[in-house]
Image (cartoon, coloured by chain):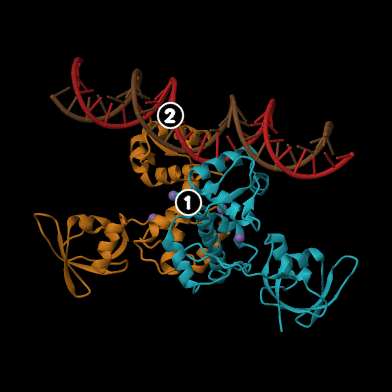
Chain colours: A orange, B cyan, C red, D brown
Amino acid sequence: MNSLVEENYLKALYTLANANGEVNVNDLSIHLSIKKPTVTSMMKKLAAKSLVHYESYKPLRLTEDGKREAALILRKHRLTEMFLVEKMGFGWEEVHEIAEQVEHVKAPKFFEKMDELLNYPSFDPHGSPIPNSNGEIKEEKYLHLSDCATGDTVKVKAVAHSSNEFLTFLNRREIKLGLEIYIESIESFDASMRVKVNDEIQSLSHTVCERLLVEKVS
Amino acid sequence: MNSLVEENYLKALYTLANANGEVNVNDLSIHLSIKKPTVTSMMKKLAAKSLVHYESYKPLRLTEDGKREAALILRKHRLTEMFLVEKMGFGWEEVHEIAEQVEHVKAPKFFEKMDELLNYPSFDPHGSPIPNSNGEIKEEKYLHLSDCATGDTVKVKAVAHSSNEFLTFLNRREIKLGLEIYIESIESFDASMRVKVNDEIQSLSHTVCERLLVEKVS
DNA sequence: TAATTTTGTTAGATTAATCTAACTTTATAT
DNA sequence: ATATAAAGTTAGATTAATCTAACAAAATTA
Ligand SMILES: [Mn+2]
Ligand SMILES: [Mn+2]
Ligand SMILES: [Mn+2]
Ligand SMILES: [Mn+2]
């Protein structure tokens, strides 16, 4: 049984991993706001538990066991977020902080019940996939809105960053998952987009467009 | 902000308190399965935080602040149990363990939402009162079924012990809160009761009768 | 390539929460 | 009232998780 602290390291290793599954001590340290020597010593501990491949001065990698453990925590996190939004009436900007704590509850039945009541959802309120109970996850490959072109019609599928501030901004603009966006034009000097949503014209900054994950329609 | 560990000590102090609000180090030690020297040192720590009145060799007492803190944790515990039963479909025998963990979540909105969705309940699934958001609680004074007499008709209001085993036993006997019980007779040699419930005769051992809290009907 | 910066490790200290062994105080029993 | 038992405390050790200071390795820059 892993401690709450170990679980947070595992989750961070999982979500920070690059295409090769690698993470630097430095990046982990920054992400968790924990000093590097502490990270190193925790990595040795997780390596002793066969959850991390650790070699001095080499990038960190989760073992298969470590990946499964991490995915199962992520599963609890995302099921919780979905439950809070769908069954308890929270806004998508309110749930991450709560899920950050609830994900550490050791009670399989609790999360199985959420899953059942939600009718086995595949995605969380931010469009991220929910790993299955074996820790398997199928990543969708969406486009960033910022990579689309004038004339494209796209549908919002997920948000790439889910800070309270960004989500609250999207609330004010009435942008939510499933929304269709038509790209009217792109400003050349700042890459902001003039888009049509719900028959209304809006301007979206490049920063916003980078954080919106979409899929082409038609 | 109190740690999870401190919270569990506070809750234990609150629930173990006798009529004078006193608890012995020894009782706390046994209840929490923590050795006495550890309890003593934690009491000094809680005293330093003004949550416990501590004097060497004297019984422990929560301060007013300590009582409020404890009641607020108990509130979260009981709201959680009620939510699990009423909104998620758990049995009353399944919820204590889960609530034991969820009660430590620091997210006032989470529990406010439960409270609201449950329509501000006064009692948990075991008939225990739920403290209000100021940590105030109104204790009902029920009778133990074992203190009632032949010919009495009573209504089950709460259970005095809520172990999984006892609650599962009550499930098998179809005994739940609100049930009316008529006392047909009491065996003199073992104090077991012959009772009528739902037009059926059952025999309840003294142990069971001691654990059922009731109110006289009529 | 050499200097500098960034990244990572080692060593040692700190805090929270726990333990055991030994001792003291208080309560109970003879 | 004395002896014994029970309850509570002190002292010192241990483990998990963190930190800072100092140093070493690797990467970047000049
Ligand atoms: Mn989240
Ligand atoms: Mn977390
Ligand atoms: Mn309970
Ligand atoms: Mn608890």
Q: Residue at x 19, y 75 (%)?
A: A199
| Horizontal arrangement in the rendering, residue A140 relative to residue A113 (left or right) | left
Q: Residues within 10 Å of mark 1 (few under 14, many from 20)?
A: many
- What is the three-letter code of the residue carrying label 2? Glu
Q: Nearer the viewer, mark 2 or mark 1?
A: 1
Q: Residue at x 53, y 59 (%)?
A: B71
Q: Find residue B217 and report its image quarter.
A: bottom right
**Above or below for B118 versus B103:** below
Taking depth in this image into account, of B169 and B111 the one nearest to the observer is B111
Q: Regarding mark 2 in the picture, which secondary structure is present there?
A: loop
| Horizontal arrangement in the rendering, residue B201 relative to residue A17 (left or right) | right
Q: Residue at x 46, y 60 (%)?
A: A79
Q: Is mark 2 within 8 Å of ligand 2?
A: no
Point out the residue furthest to the left here.
A189
The Cα–Cα distance between marks 2 and 1, rounded to whole angstroms, is 25 Å
Q: Residues within 10 Å of mark 2 (few under 14, many from 20)?
A: few
- Number of marks: 2
Q: Which mark is residue A73?
A: 1
Q: Regarding mark 1 in the picture, which secondary structure is present there?
A: helix
Q: Which residue is mark 2?
A: A55
Residue A57 appears in the figure: no
Q: Find residue C4 and report its image quarter.
A: top left
| Horizontal arrangement in the rendering, residue A150 relative to residue A179 (left or right) | left
Q: Is mark 1 within 8 Å of ligand 2?
A: yes
Taking depth in this image into account, of C18 and A76 the one nearest to the observer is C18
**Above or below for D26 versus D16:** above
